[in-house]
Image (tube, rainbow, N blue to C red):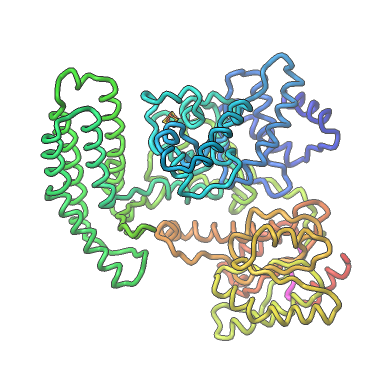
C-alpha cells in the first residue's frame, strides 16, 4: 500500500522525489502504525519528515476507514505547514478513493482562541454598536464558509480587552442555545476528524486532566519532540493562590444564587468558609509571609526553602476545608427536588472540577521529597503562587499508551533515541537515527576557535576581536548568536559602527540588525533580499525555526556553547539531571547549525567562539561534525578560502 501511495504521489507531483532517508522513515512509521508500536525517528533537516509520517497514515487510512491520528507540534509554523501537506495528502486520497469523502482535520487551539456566542450576547452592551455589527457580519460569513469561529478567522483588528469579552470563559453547553454550531464545543469535545493537529501543551493538558481524552485515536505523532519533556513538566506543575482558593468559594456562591438558595443561608455558608475559616486565614497568612520574603529578596521569582511539614499540614487542611465546604453546600439546597435537578447537578459538578487541581497538587506534593520540588512565583498580577513540580516524568502515571512516533531533527544522543525515550518513561520498539540527506562535508566547514574562553578575564575582548575578523571576511550574510541578551547588546553596540564603516569602504551597504530592536519580518526580508548585505545579533529564538535557504544565510557565529543558565525553577529541575542539561545544550547547538544548510545547494561556515569545545567533557559537540566528515579548523584563513571558492 505504501508503494501504491508513493506512485500516486509521483503522479500528482512529478518533481516529488522520495529520499532514501525519508523512505526509511516511512517504513518505520508504517510498522509502528500497523502494530501499535512505540517509535522514535531522529530525522535531520531535509529528510521531509512530515511526509515521512503523513504518507504511512494515508496508507493506513486506505485499509482502515476509522483510523484516526493526533499530531502534536511545538510551533504554530509547523502546524500551518502541516495543513498545506494535508491538502496534498487529500488530493492523493481522492484520486485513489474518488467515491469517499475527503479526509478531515481539525486544529485544536487553546480555549482562549475560540469565539463564544453566548458571551458575545451577554457582553454586547459593553461593546460599541459598530463593533458588534462587524462581529455579527463576520459570524454570518464564517458560517456560510463553514469555517471555525476563532480569533484567527475573525480577520479584523481588536484589542485584547475586546477579545476578552468574546472568548470562551467557561462552557456550560447544556444551557447554551448556540452549542449546535459552536466551534469550541465541536473542536474540543465532538471532533470526529481523521487528524487532530494540536500543540504539546494542549495535548498533555487534556491527557492529564480529561478522562480518556485521546482514547478514540489509534496513533499519536509528536513532531518537534525534543521539546516534550519541558512541556510535560510545565503542564504537570500545579499551583495554589489566595485568589484561587477564594475563587472556589465564590463560585459556590454564584451557583447558590443561580439555583434560588436563600440569601441568609448563602451568607452563613460563605462567611463560614470564605471569610472567617481558620484554614483560609492560615493559608493567607502563610502566603503573605512568603510575599514579604520575596519583596526583601527584591525578586519576582524565588525558590524558597520550605518547612515541609508546615506546607504538608496546610495542604491537608485545605483539602479537608474544600470537602467540608462542598458537602455542606449540598445540605443548604432548598429542596430534595432541587438536589435531583439536572442543571443544578451539572453546575455543582462543574464547580467541583476546579477542586481537582487541589487534589493533583496534594498527590504530587505527597511524592517522596526527591521526586518533587515546591517553589513560589509572583505572577503578572502580583499574586503569590505556591507551586509544585515533579522532578521527572517517570514519577507521573504513564503518558504514552497507544502506538506513538516521536520525531525531530534533533533527538538522538550517542546514535540512539533511547535516552530521550527513557526520560519520557517509554521503552522504544523502533529506534532509528537517520543520516543527513545532504553532502555536509562539501557544503560546510567548521571553525572552532582556540582563543576565546568564557572562563578567561579577557573573554569579551577576545570575542570582539574574533567576531570582527569573521564579519570582515566579506559580504557574507551572518547570524551572530548569543546565549545572553546583555552580552549580545554590548557586542552590538561596540561593533555596529565599525562594521558599517568597513562595508562602506568596501563599496557596499551593510545592515546590522539587533533582535531586541528590530522587527522579525523586516530582518527576515533583509536576509532573503539578494541586494541586502545583513548581519543579525540574536539570541536563542534564532537558534531554531528559521528557514533561510541558499545565499540568504552563509555564516553562523556561535559565541558560546549553549548550556542553559537556569532562570526558571522548571528549567532548574531539568538541569539537575546532568544528562538532560548536556543533551539540551547539544540539541540547541545542533539546532543552531541546522539553520545553515537547508537544501542540497546551500553552503556556509559554522564558527564556534568557545574553546571549551576542545575539553574532554565536551567532545560530543565536535563529534556532531566528525560523524559527517565535516572539516573542522582553528584557522581563519581556511574559512576565508572556503567562502572565496564558493563565490
Ligand atoms: S457551547 Fe460553550 S463555548 Fe460554545 S457558545 Fe455555548 S457557552 Fe460558548
Name the residue: 44% across, 44% down.
164
Q: Quadrant of residue 264?
A: top left
Give the vertical position of 342 relative to 422 (above or below).
above
Specify the quarter for ligand 1: top left
Give the vertical position of 461 relative to 215 (above or below).
below
Residue at the extreme front: 129
Q: Quadrant of the C terminus?
A: bottom right
Q: Which residues are magenta?
A: 630-634
Q: Quadrant of residue 196?
A: top right
Residue 393 at x, y percent in the picture = 42, 46
| Main secondary structure of the magenta stretch | strand
Residue 27 at x, y percent in the picture = 68, 33
Name the residue: 56% across, 83% down.
456
The answer to whether 566 appears left or right of 90 in the picture is: left
The answer to whether 147 appears left or right of 353 in the picture is: right
Is 9 in the magenta?
no
Is 631 in the magenta?
yes
Residue at the extreme top: 99
Amino acid at each position: 500500500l505504501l508503494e501504491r501511495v508513493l506512485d500516486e504521489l509521483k503522479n500528482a507531483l512529478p518533481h516529488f522525489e522520495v529520499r532514501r532517508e525519508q523512505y526509511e522513515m516511512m517504513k518505520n512509521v508504517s510498522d509502528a502504525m500497523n502494530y501499535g508500536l512505540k517509535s522514535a525517528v531522529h530525522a535531520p533537516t531535509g529528510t521531509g519528515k512530515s511526509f515521512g509520517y503523513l504518507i504511512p497514515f494515508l496508507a493506513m487510512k486506505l485499509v482502515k476507514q476509522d483510523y484516526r491520528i493526533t499530531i502534536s507540534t511545538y510551533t504554530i509554523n509547523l502546524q500551518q505547514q502541516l495543513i498545506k501537506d494535508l491538502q496534498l495528502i487529500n488530493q492523493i486520497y481522492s484520486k485513489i478513493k474518488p467515491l469517499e469523502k475527503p479526509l478531515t482535520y481539525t486544529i485544536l487551539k487553546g480555549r482562549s482562541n475560540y469565539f463564544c456566542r453566548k458571551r458575545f450576547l451577554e457582553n454586547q452592551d459593553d461593546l460599541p454598536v459598530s463593533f458588534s455589527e462587524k462581529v455579527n457580519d463576520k459570524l454570518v460569513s464564517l458560517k456560510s464558509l463553514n469555517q471555525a469561529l476563532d480569533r484567527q478567522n475573525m480577520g479584523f483588528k481588536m484589542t485584547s480587552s475586546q477579545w476578552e469579552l468574546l472568548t470562551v470563559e467557561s462552557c456550560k453547553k447544556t444551557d447554551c442555545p448556540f452549542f449546535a454550531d459552536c466551534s469550541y464545543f465541536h473542536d474540543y469535545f465532538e471532533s470526529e476528524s481523521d487528524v487532530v493537529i494540536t500543540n504539546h501543551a494542549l495535548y498533555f493538558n487534556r491527557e492529564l486532566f480529561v478522562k480518556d481524552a485521546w482514547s478514540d485515536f489509534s496513533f499519536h505523532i509528536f513532531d518537534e519532540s525534543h521539546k516534550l519533556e519541558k512541556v510535560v513538566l510545565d503542564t504537570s506543575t500545579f499551583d495554589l493562590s489566595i485568589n484561587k482558593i477564594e475563587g472556589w468559594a465564590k463560585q459556590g456562591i454564584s451557583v447558590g444564587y443561580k439555583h434560588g438558595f436563600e440569601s441568609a443561608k448563602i451568607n452563613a455558608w460563605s462567611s463560614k468558609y470564605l471569610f472567617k475559616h481558620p484554614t483560609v486565614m492560615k493559608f493567607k497568612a502563610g502566603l503573605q509571609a512568603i510575599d514579604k520574603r520575596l519583596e526583601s529578596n527584591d525578586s519576582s521569582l524565588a525558590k524558597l526553602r520550605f518547612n515541609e511539614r508546615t506546607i504538608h499540614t496546610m495542604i491537608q487542611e485545605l483539602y479537608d476545608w474544600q470537602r467540608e465546604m462542598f458537602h455542606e453546600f449540598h445540605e443548604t439546597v432548598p429542596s430534595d427536588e432541587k438536589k435531583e435537578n439536572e442543571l443544578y447537578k451539572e453546575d455543582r459538578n462543574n464547580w467541583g472540577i476546579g477542586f481537582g487541581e487541589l487534589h493533583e497538587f496534594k498527590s504530587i506534593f505527597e511524592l517522596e521529597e526527591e521526586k518533587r520540588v515546591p517553589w513560589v512565583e509572583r505572577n503578572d498580577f502580583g499574586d503569590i503562587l505556591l507551586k509544585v513540580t515533579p522532578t521527572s516524568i517517570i514519577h507521573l502515571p504513564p503518558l504514552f499508551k497507544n502506538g506513538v512516533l516521536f520525531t525531530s531533527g534533533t533527538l538522538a544522543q550517542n546514535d540512539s533515541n533511547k535516552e530521550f525515550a527513557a526520560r519520557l518513561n517509554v521503552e522504544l520498539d523502533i529506534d532509528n537515527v537517520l543520516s543527513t540527506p545532504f553532502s555536509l562535508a562539501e557544503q560546510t566547514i567548521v571553525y572552532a576557535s582556540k582563543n576565546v574562553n568564557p572562563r578567561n578575564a579577557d573573554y569579551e575582548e577576545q570575542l570582539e576581536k574574533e567576531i570582527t575578523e569573521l564579519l570582515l571576511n566579506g559580504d557574507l550574510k551572518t547570524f551572530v548568536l548569543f546565549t545572553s541578551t546583555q552580552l549580545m547588546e554590548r557586542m552590538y553596540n561596540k561593533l555596529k559602527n565599525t562594521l558599517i564603516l568597513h562595508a562602506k569602504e568596501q563599496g557596499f551597504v551593510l545592515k546590522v540588525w539587533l533582535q531586541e530592536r528590530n522587527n522579525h519580518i523586516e530582518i527576515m526580508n533583509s536576509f532573503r533580499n539578494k541586494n541586502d548585505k545583513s548581519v543579525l545579533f540574536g539570541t536563542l529564538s534564532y537558534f531554531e525555526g528559521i528557514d533561510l535557504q541558499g545565499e540568504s544565510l552563509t555564516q553562523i557565529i556561535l559565541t558560546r556553547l549553549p548550556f542553559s543558565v537556569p532562570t526558571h525553577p522548571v528549567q532548574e529541575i531539568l538541569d539537575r539531571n546532568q544528562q538532560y542539561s548536556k543533551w539540551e545544550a547539544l540539541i540547541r547547538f545542533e539546532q543552531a547549525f541546522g539553520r545553515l544548510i537547508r537544501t542540497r545547494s546551500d553552503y556556509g561556515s559554522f564558527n564556534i567562539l568557545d574553546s571549551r569545545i576542545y575539553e574532554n567533557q565536551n567532545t560530543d559537540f565536535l563529534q556532531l561534525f566528525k560523524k559527517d566528515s565535516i572539516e573542522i579548523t582553528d584557522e581563519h584563513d581556511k574559512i576565508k578560502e572556503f567562502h572565496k571558492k564558493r563565490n
